[in-house]
Amino acid sequence: MSAPRRALVLTPALLLLVACARAGPAAPAPSVAVPTSSVVASPTAAPAPKRTVVLDPGHNGGNGSARAAITRQVPDGRGGTKACNTTGTSTDAGYPEHAFTWDLAGRVRAHLEAAGIAVVLTRTSDDGVGPCVDERGKAGQQAGADLLVSLHADGAAAAGHGFHVAYSSPPLNAAQSGPAVDLARDLRDALRGGGFPTSTYVGREGLSPRPDLGGLNFATVPAALVECANMRNAEEAAVVSSAEGRERYAAAIATGIRNFLGALPS
């Protein structure tokens, strides 16, 4: 005799399974649109810090009428003293160095600011007195600058020509022992690249280490002084006296500064 068949009891769970099997696969869940306002953007990288350059246009237009002020003695940065400032030189036709350096500084500044570099000047006009060389030398660190470049033109014997770039030597601090020399070389190379010849009467290959320049001795940031030309040389006097010539100097000096800044750690 065969065993009796057991009755299938349809529990609620079994009924649900049967219904799902007859209905086919479940439809996918509807997608939910996320409002764009609720999306959090990934943080962007912080902008690189802006570089700062101090330009020191040599001398000043009021120095000639303020003899007592500019001849007073100030520290030279090496334990001695020297005159606060001087009147500077001029071309034989009377174009003064202070006017040349002031115009040149404005042109260099324009090039640098166009490249996103902040610029500070050691004087704000060409009709003032000073500042003294020790103040000029400290201007770089006081501005929190990356470097200082002093702008000048020379007044040597008429037969000499060409530019030279001075730096403080022997060095008095870490900035002077290496970075200042690198800055001087970058300026030298850029001026050469701009078609300007190196000096025939001072320095070597366009570089001139100097112990006596207070405007460099007091610097604790890389600092260099550019003697752009000999204003007593007729050919170079014509260049510095022309707007086109000053623009050529400015473009070259700005290139040297940018090249130096480009090699600094970010």
Image (spheres, rainbow, N blue to C red):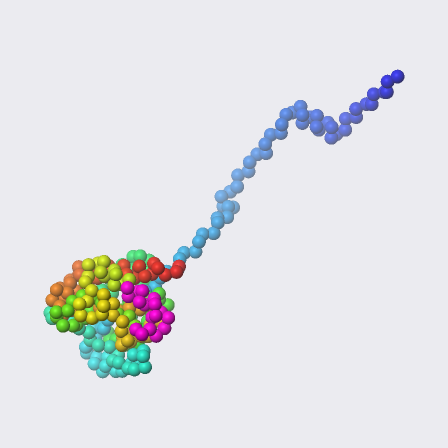
Does the image show residue 151? no
Q: Is residue 55 above or below residue 77?
A: above
**Closer to us: 28 or 233:** 233
Measuring from the top left, give residue 214's x and y in whole percent: 29, 76
Q: Which region shows up in magenta?
A: 169-185
Measuring from the top left, give residue 67's x and y in whole percent: 21, 81
Relative to 114, is 46 on the left or the right? right
Position of the C terminus, as image quadrant, is bottom left
At a point 48% along the width and 49% down the height, the residue shown is: 42
At a point 18% along the width and 70% down the height, the residue shown is: 201
Position of the N terminus, as image quadrant, is top right
The part of the image, by quadrant, that contains residue 200 is bottom left
- Magenta span: chief secondary structure: helix
Relative to 68, is 223 on the left or the right? right
Measuring from the top left, give residue 153's x and y in whole percent: 20, 69
At a point 20% along the width and 75% down the height, the residue shown is: 87
Measuring from the top left, give residue 19's x and y in whole percent: 69, 26
Q: Residue furthest front?
A: 204
The part of the image, by quadrant, that contains residue 171 is bottom left
**Closer to us: 48 or 205:** 205
Relative to 161, is 29 on the left or the right? right
**Closer to us: 51 or 18:** 51
Number of numbered discs: 0
At a point 21% along the width and 62% down the height, the residue shown is: 249
**Closer to us: 175 or 69:** 175
Whether residue 171 appears in magenta in the rendering, the answer is yes
